Image (cartoon, rainbow, N blue to C red):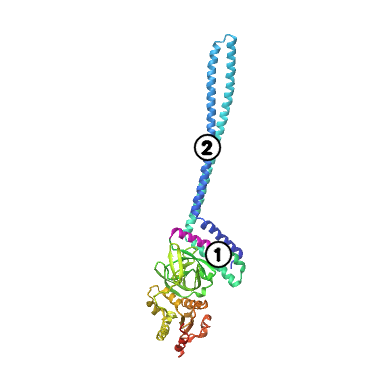
Amino acid sequence: MEELHEIEKRLTEFENIIREFFRQNPVDHANALIKERADQLNDWIKRNVSELETRQSELQRQIESTDTLEAKITDMDQKLEQLKSNVGDSDSISRYRNLADERNSLVQKYNKLVQECEQNNDLYNQKVNEFNQEQEKRRADMEEFQRNLAEKVEQYNKWIKDDGPLQFFNQVNTLYATLIQEIRRDKRYELEGHLDRLRHIRRELGEHTKTRHNRSRQGGHIIQATLCQSEECYFVVSKASMTCITPEMVDILGIRQHVGEEVEIRLADASKTRKPQLVIPKITVNEFGADYIKAVVIQASEEGVDGCIGYSFLNKFDHVIDNKGLILKPLQPIGGDIRFDVFICHKSDDFSAAREVFDLLTEKGYKPFLSEVSLAECGTTDYQKAIDAALEGTEHLVLVASSCSNIETPWVEAEWRSFESLKRSGKKHGNIVPVVCGEIAVNELPLALSRYQVLSMDDPDWKAAIINYLPRL
């Protein structure tokens, strides 16, 4: 087991990935940052250009003022020349001197203004050079900023292309399962805080993918469900025959012992594959719960999604899938007036023995359900729904088995445990009758069946006995 500081380090890395890659779209975020930076640069340029234009206008007005003074001085020089040639009396001399004084005053003013113009022109040119240098620097910084963001976007796109989100989700779940197992095995309750952080990460991933599905309206509805009354999960509502969960979720729930041999299932796209079968003790969607759901184990295909809700759960209810999502209602009987009173639970290996029980009960006036025989009577090609409805509607269950392994086969176990759960809840009042054949020993049966009377087909009186345990209700 990792040390606490290593767990803390990994959790921090996970939370950073959530913050950078899931709470915001890195591409959109990069574009927004570039736009913000570009707007800041353009505002700075606009502000400084406006300041330079103001300085240039002031300088131009000063130059125009010097031109005006120069014209006045030139005009006075001409008048002085005229007066100079006509100076003869004291009045002429006085006018000449006054005009000369006025002219000299204008020259002083002109020289001062020229000096100010030269200083302001130098300052203006200095400001222009400073602006050009700063603008070049800022544009270079902007280009460097864009390159850095482009590298990050490229890394993100490669991460997406290489299934980075899915690998990240699997890493989160692997650590989550490991910590849960540590708590269960070694009572390491100091890890509870770390579990809460991982649950928050899982919830964010689920909501992220759910939001993406809702926006795109593709890939099926994603719903929240609770597994085994403890784990909050996100599932795709699927047209697959079986409910599916990931291997990591199997370990998180601690139901590895319920995983069995591979079976053939139909996926949502109607293709078929073989996956390990499994029994999920309980699934709850909104207020609708079902016990001992037949399922298979399949690898995660999307971050934040722990599997799919298939018909093995949906057929426990009347259900509708529309634009608003999944609507569940209590299951109504199917197949018209057909009602079965005994459900015969068995693995296909034990069909011959199960058929013998079926024929006996039929002969005695019962309406037993044996899937290989009875499905044709149900008037539907949705066989799993017919099996679930028959199990829901029958009064008694007979479990036929030639070995303990057949009894514990996940889907067989799902049927008899589901019936037992209905008995415990008071919804069923009939009996569970285990009927064994072959080499199986009664004391080898699962503990949950030890409370029931077990009949052996090797006992010559088993046929009479079974009728006694199946009273009409």
Image location (x, y in percent) of residue 391: 45, 77
Q: Is most of the magenta stretch helix, strand or loop? A: helix
Task: Please tell me whether residue 168 is drawn above or below residue 123 in the rendered image.
Answer: below
Q: Which residue is at a point 45% across and 62% down the rendered structure image?
A: 324
Quadrant (top left/top right/bottom left/bottom right) for the N terminus: bottom right
**245 or 429: nearer the viewer:** 429
- Residue 128 in view in this figure: no
Q: Amino acid at mark 1?
A: Arg
Q: Residue under circle 2?
A: 50
Q: Amino acid at mark 2?
A: Ser
Q: Is residue 15 magenta?
A: no
Mark positioned earlier in the residue sequence (1 or 2): 2
Residue 261 badge: none
- How many numbered marks are there? 2
Residue 199 badge: 1
Q: Is residue 214 magenta?
A: yes
In the image, the segment drawn in magenta is 195-217
Q: Which residue is at a point 56% across and 32% down the rendered structure image?
A: 122
Between the C-alphas of marks 1 and 2, the distance is 55 Å
Task: Please tell me whether residue 335 is drawn above or below residue 200 in the rendered image.
Answer: below
Task: Please tell me whether residue 65 is drawn above or below residue 312 in the rendered image.
Answer: above
Task: Please tell me whether residue 212 is drawn above or below residue 44 in the rendered image.
Answer: below
Image location (x, y in percent) of residue 257: 51, 75
Q: Quadrant of residue 109?
A: top right
Are there few (<14), some (14-19), or many (20+) residues within 10 Å of tag 1? some
Judged from this view, the residue extending furthest toward the bottom is 460
Image location (x, y in percent) of residue 291: 50, 74
Q: Quadrant of residue 339?
A: bottom left
**258 or 123: nearer the viewer:** 258
Image location (x, y in percent) of residue 235: 48, 66
